[in-house]
Image (spheres, rainbow, N blue to C red):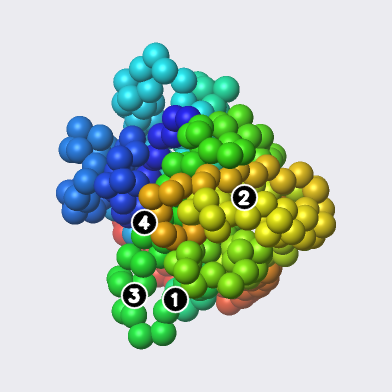
Amino acid sequence: MRAIIIGVGQCGTKIADLFSLVDFEALAINTSRGDLEYLKHIPSDRRILIGESLTGGKGVNANPVLGREAMRRDLPMVMRKINSMVGYEDVDIFFLTFGFGGGTGAGGTPLLAEALKEEYPDSLVVAIGALPLKEEGIRPTINAAITIDKLSKVADSIIAIDNNKLKEGDLDISQAYERINYTIVERIASLLALIDIPGEQTLDASDLKFVLKAFGSFATVGYAKARADQIKSLSKLIVKSFESEGLYLEANVESALYGLVAIHGPPEVLKAKDIFEALDELTDRIKGKQIFRGFYPDPRTREVEVVTLLSGIYDSESIEGIIRTAKEYASSFMRAKAEAESKKKELLEGLPDFDDIYPGEVDG
Ligand SMILES: Nc1nc2c(ncn2[C@@H]2O[C@H](COP(=O)(O)OP(=O)(O)OP(=O)(O)O)[C@@H](O)[C@H]2O)c(=O)[nH]1
C-alpha cells in the first residue's frame, strides 16, 4: 500500500509535516515562504513555494481566487516534483490535506486534485480538509462551501474534519489545532498501518480503495482505544468508534454506503463473538450494508485500537450547516450588492458635467 500525502496551505502543510514525522512520503505546497520554513519534518527539497510572482511569497490572505491562480501558474512545477517522487512504483492513494477556510488550500487543492486524477487515473485522490470554526466568520464558511462543491466533482472521497467538534475547553487556538492535527494523523496513520499486513482477517489496498472510491462523497474516520485490561465489552468499544463521539464530523452514520473496521489488540481480547456482534450492528445501521474488516491479534500490545472508516456519506449536519450559511449569505450579499448599485445610480442620476456649469472657461 503506497500513499503520498500532499499538504496545501498552512493547515495542510502542518498536517503533512506530522505525516512525514511518522515516515509517510509527504510534500508541502504553500504561497507563504515563512510557513514553509516553519515546517519541521518534511525535507526542504519537498517544500514548494507557489505563486511567488503573484504574492512575493507572502501568502494569499484567505483569498481563494489568488490561491487558485498561484496553483494554476505553478502547476507544471508541482506536477514535475510529484512525478519525481512517484518514480516507477504505483501510488494507491494521494491524500491532499488542507484547511477549507483559507485561500491557498481552498483555492489550490481542487486544481491539484484534477491534475492528479488526469496524470494518475489508477490512483485515488482523497481530500482531507479541516472545516472552519463557526467563530471565524463568513469568509471561511464561503470558501469551505465552494471548495466542497469543487472537490466533490473531482476527488474520490472527502474526509472532512470539523474543527468545531474538536475544540477542547481550555486550550488556546494553536494548541487546539495541534491536537486536531495530531489526531487526524494518528487515525489515518493507524488505518494505513493495518493495510496489507498479516493478520487474522486482513485488509488490503484494494479494500481501502474500494471503500474510498465513492464519487466525491464524504467519509469520516472513527477511532477508539483502550487498555486491554480495562475493557469490559469489546463490542461496545468497537461501536463507540463509529458513534458521534468517535467521529470528527457531525454525520448521520446511517447514510454511509461502505464501512471498514480494523481492530488491533492482544489475541486473548479479540474474541470473534464480540467482534461479529459489533460488526453486525454496524452493517445493520448503514445504508450500503458493505463492511470490510480486519483483525490483527498482536501479542506484543496491551492496548486495543479500533479504526473505523465510513464512506459514501451524504447526510452531515457539519457540511449542511456550512452550505446553508454560504447560500443564505450569497443570496443576501447579491441582493445587497444589486441594491447598492441601483441606489448609487439613482443618487447620481441627473448630475451635469463640469462643462455644463463652467462653460467657456478653457479657450478653443
Ligand atoms: N485542524 C486545523 N485547522 C487549521 C489549522 N490551521 C488553520 N486551520 C483552519 O484552516 C483555515 C485556514 O486555512 P490555512 O491553511 O491557514 O490557510 P491557507 O490555505 O494557508 O491560505 P492563506 O493563509 O490564505 O494563504 C481556517 O478555517 C482554520 O480554522 C491547523 O493547524 N489545524
Tell me which residue sits at (55%, 31%) in the image. 205
**Please, what secondary structure does the residue beneath circle 4 have?**
helix
Tell me the amino acid under the disc marked 4.
Cys
Residue 70 visible in this rendered orientation of the protein: no
Closer to the eye: label 4 or 2 = 2
**Please, what secondary structure does the residue beneath circle 3 have?**
helix
Tell me which residue sits at (62%, 69%) in the image. 233
Q: Separation of disc 1 and disc 4 at Cα?
A: 15 Å
Q: Earlier in the sequence, mark 4 or mark 2?
A: 4
**Please, what secondary structure does the residue beneath circle 2 have?**
strand
Q: Find disc 3 in the rendering and name its residue.
A: 173
- Contact between marks 3 and 2 (CB within 8 A): the answer is no
Q: Name the residue nearer the viewer: 210 or 342.
A: 210
Residue 310 relative to residue 166: left or right: right
Q: Is mark 3 within 8 Å of ligand 1?
A: no
Q: Find disc 4 in the rendering and name its residue.
A: 11
Q: Separation of disc 4 and disc 2 at Cα?
A: 28 Å
Tell me which residue sits at (53%, 63%) in the image. 224
Closer to the eye: label 1 or 3 = 1
Residue 325 location in percent, x, y? Answer: 64, 70
Quick check: 245 above or below 103?
A: below
Residue 83 relative to residue 152: left or right: left
Label 4 Cα neighbours within 10 Å, binned few <14 / some 14-19 / many ≥20: many
Residue 156 location in percent, x, y? Answer: 62, 38
Q: Separation of disc 4 and disc 3 at Cα?
A: 13 Å
Tell me the amino acid under the disc marked 2.
Val
Q: Earlier in the sequence, mark 2 or mark 1?
A: 1
Residue 261, which numbered label? 2
Q: Separation of disc 3 and disc 2 at Cα?
A: 32 Å
Q: Separation of disc 1 and disc 3 at Cα?
A: 8 Å
Q: Is mark 4 within 8 Å of ligand 1?
A: yes
**Please, what secondary structure does the residue beneath circle 1 have?**
loop
